[in-house]
Image (spheres, rainbow, N blue to C red):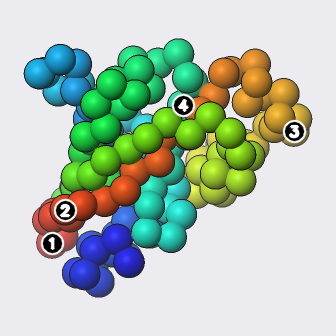
Amino acid sequence: MISDNTAFDQFISDHRWAVVTTMRGGEPVSSVVAYARDGDELVVSTPGTTFKTRSVAANANVTICVLTNQEPFNFVSIEGSAFVQHDNLEQDTTRVFENLAGTGYELPADLSHWLDSQQRVILRIKPKRVYGVIR
């Protein structure tokens, strides 16, 4: 479990979009991402050239805020540490695409080539603190 609160834990499993916040020096920087759950960790597929990838490599502290797509805009935030995973990307990337099922995003037919051409990496997030609001 990511959270001892079963409602928070289920919320994380049930959703697919989040805002991840990393640090630029001492300033927070946020971006919208798709994520997936891998047991008690979260994975985000992103190009290795993005700021968030460089930021995580410099400072592992992140917050990822999981959101609903409609009112009342419930959320669960997960504070934790992240690391940049450069290998064994196919399984975690597939998890992210499976979590996006029904949204129009499709797993690339030649996943290995797509990962290489996009210079993709996985941001693997290990939770430390979980909190939120579910109405």
Classify residue 119 by image quadrant. top right
**Looking at the image, is mark 2 or mark 1 earlier in the sequence?**
2
Q: CA distance from mark 2 to mark 1?
A: 20 Å
Query: Disc 2 marks which amino acid?
Result: Arg
**Looking at the image, is mark 2 or mark 4 earlier in the sequence?**
4
**Does the CB distance between marks 2 and 1 fall below 8 Å?**
no
Dot 4 surroundings within 10 Å: few (below 14), some, or many (20 or more)? Answer: many
Query: Between residues 7 and 85, which one lies in front from this camera angle?
Result: 85
Dot 3 surroundings within 10 Å: few (below 14), some, or many (20 or more)? Answer: few
- Identify the residue under disc 3: 109
**Does the CB distance between marks 4 and 1 fall below 8 Å?**
no
Q: CA distance from mark 4 to mark 1?
A: 31 Å
**Looking at the image, is mark 4 or mark 1 earlier in the sequence?**
4
Q: In the picture, which quadrant includes the N terminus?
A: bottom left
Query: Disc 4 marks which amino acid?
Result: Thr
Q: Residue shown at 19%/62% (left/top)?
A: 129
| Disc sitting over residue 46 in the figure | 4
Does residue 60 sit above or below 31 in this rendering? below
**Looking at the image, is mark 1 or mark 3 earlier in the sequence?**
3
Q: Is residue 26 visible?
A: yes
- Identify the residue under disc 1: 135
**Does the CB distance between marks 1 and 3 fall below 8 Å?**
no
**Mark 3 element type:** loop
Q: CA distance from mark 3 to mark 2?
A: 37 Å
Q: Whole-percent x and y of residue 82?
A: 38, 44
Q: CA distance from mark 2 to mark 4?
A: 23 Å
Query: Disc 3 marks which amino acid?
Result: Ala
| Disc sitting over residue 129 in the figure | 2
Q: Whole-percent x and y of residue 102?
A: 63, 54
Q: CA distance from mark 1 to mark 3?
A: 40 Å
